[in-house]
Amino acid sequence: MSTQSLVDTLKDALSAHAPFITGTCAIPADEFSLYYGHLKDAHHIDLSKATSAQLQDLADACQPATFGLNKQDVLDESYRKAGKMDTSNFSSKFDIEGSGIMDHVRDGLVPGQGDVRAELYKLNVYGKDSFFKAHKDTPRGADMFGSLVVFFPCEQTGGALLLRHEGKEWTFDSTETLSECADPSVGYVAFYSDVEHEVALVTSGHRVTLTYNLYYKSTVALQPSLAIRRLSAAEAGVEATCKAALLGLLDDSTILPQGGILGFGLHHEYSFDKSADLKGSDALIKRVCDQLSLNPKLVCVYEDALGEIGNAMLSHGFIHISRHHEIEDLGRELLAEGAITIRDPLAETSDANTYNFKRQEPQNVYWVTQPTENTSLSTSYIRYGNQASLSHYYAKVSLVVSVGPAKQRILHTPEYLPPTSIPLTNF
């Protein structure tokens, strides 16, 4: 198989890892029961056969729904028009763990990783003319990685959930999906926090959902059997495809024949001031690299530090340069803080000698998938010149491995990467 075919196979396997899971689940009749209100004004509704009047009463008992913006809850009905009820004001008999839905979440969103938990967050009711424009969820904690939405079989038109990620779009129409179920069922969608989603306009009826926040469980509290979950057959197949393609690339003597750095851009967003468990296809490629003893590492890639296409810089952790003095040569400053220069020999304008005489021999890098802006870091500094000015530099967080020369790929020491003495402030 050609080099490009191997790369394409690996890319296809990674992109096949959808950033969401969806399905339907038949549940016992009593789990459709919802109680809301206070003691003197308590109400009960059966969401499997609720009338329009009952659903309107539920909607009237809700408050206007807010959304997260800049770490604050904002009310703006031109952006989101819907009702919400806090968990203190209702009680549902629906058992998220007993339903089996969480097993699907674990297998689909965190395969081969630790366990997760779901925390009930809100009840939402979207009546006629309700909607929620495109947005991404605001994580409610350091270990939150996604959301789970459970749909009840209430009569409605419109209100489909649209998901978007990396240029792809998926639509989940709960009414259509649940109409195909023989037994009373709920529908559900779980997705990562960085997946953009939108609730289309509800044109009639009521859209009733429970939303759960998804969190990683601490591995300290887990039983040994739960610390690492077995992969589903489908996920195991994708993993095997990735591993075979990566092994094929390592066997290809035209790729980094003298050794160097193999790199993978991240497909998801992360906040590295919090926990940084990788998600989806990022977790998959890290897992495969670990299995091959390639010692994968998260690094910062400064593509513009040298002002040259094909030549960049790389460091463990994001390097913050002091703003208290003027900087004439950004590359020199980054090198002084422990960064290394890297060169993509496949870039048309890459010049191996451009920066050598100034600093150091650049390490060759082969990007299987290019660095992305999905997770990027930035800071400002005072740039020296005829007139001092405020400037900025950026880093794209990527996953990399050091590989030895052809036929000697597995290294016992990461000789092509910078030393790990740099403070791992951000990861």
Image: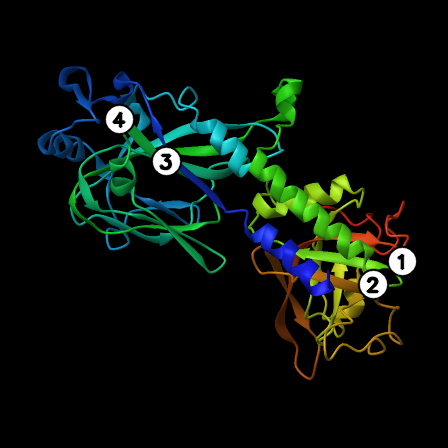
Quarter holding residue 417: bottom right
Q: Which badge, 2 or 1, is on the more N-terminal residue?
A: 2
Q: Which residue is mark 4?
A: 184
Q: CA distance from mark 2 to mark 3?
A: 45 Å
In front: mark 1 or mark 4?
4
Residue topped by disc 1: 405
Q: Nearer the viewer, residue 177 or 195?
A: 177
Q: Is residue 103 left or right of residue 128?
A: right
Q: Badge 1 local density, few (<14 within 10 Å), some, or many (20+)?
A: some
- Distance between the alpha carbons at the discs numbered 4 and 3: 14 Å
N-terminal of the pair, mark 4 or mark 2, is 4
Say which amino acid is labelled 3: Tyr
Mark 3 = which residue? 188
Q: Amino acid at mark 1?
A: Pro
For the residues marked 3 and 1, what is the alpha-carbon distance in whole angstroms? 48 Å
Instruction: Confirm whether residue 219 shows in the render.
Output: yes
Q: Nearer the viewer, residue 420 or 386?
A: 420
Asked whether 242 or 288 is in front, the reply is 242
Q: Is residue 202 left or right of residue 249?
A: left
Q: Quadrant of the N terminus?
A: bottom right
- Disc 2 on helix, strand or loop? loop
